[in-house]
Amino acid sequence: MLKPERALDRHDINAAVRRAGLTLTKIAENAGLPENACRSGVGGGNRKGARAIATALGIPFRVLFPTMYLPPRPDDDEPIPHNRANDSANAEASTDNARRAG
């Protein structure tokens, strides 16, 4: 498994894919994605394509793409802290909706 010492750019990622004997198109096809998904993913344009690349290379998504695709999503490698402030805002909105309906 490749463990980068620095953030990889698109050229580094493409080279890692080639060293693994893969192509971006093949990775996309194997993941059930459109053939251009991984090419877009390398440049920050397709999160599913980027995730497929990380999976194919055996590198955690956040290690391979540390600065792209922010904010992290719940299905990323790192947990997202729960924001309690949103809970109270959602509860107030829910109460307001219930009052209007009632």
Image: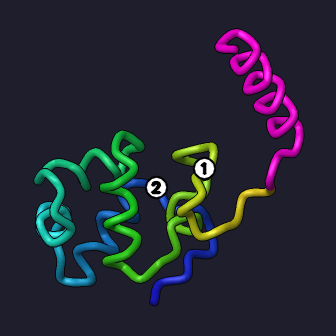
Residue at point 32% right, 66% down? 52
Crowd rating for badge 1 (residues with CA inside 10 Å; few <14, some 14–19, many 20+)? few
Q: Is residue 6 above or below residue 56?
A: above
Where residue 4 sits in the image (x, y, percent)? 56, 75
Please, what is the three-letter code of the amino acid marked with disc 1? Thr
Frontmost residue, 9 versus 93: 93
Q: Is residue 65 above or below residue 20?
A: above
Find the magenta span and give its range: 82-102
Disc 2 and disc 1: Cα gap in Å?
11 Å
**Tag of residue 67:** 1
Q: Position of residue 32 (x, y in %)?
A: 16, 63
Residue under the image location 15 percent in, 72 percent down: 30
| Left or right of 54 on screen, residue 97 | right
Indicate whether 97 appears above or below 11.
Answer: above
Q: Give how far across and how far down residue 73 sits, in percent.
A: 58, 52
Q: Residue at x 81, y 32 (%)?
A: 91
- The residue at which mark 2 appears reads as 9
The quarter of the displayed image where residue 93 is located: top right
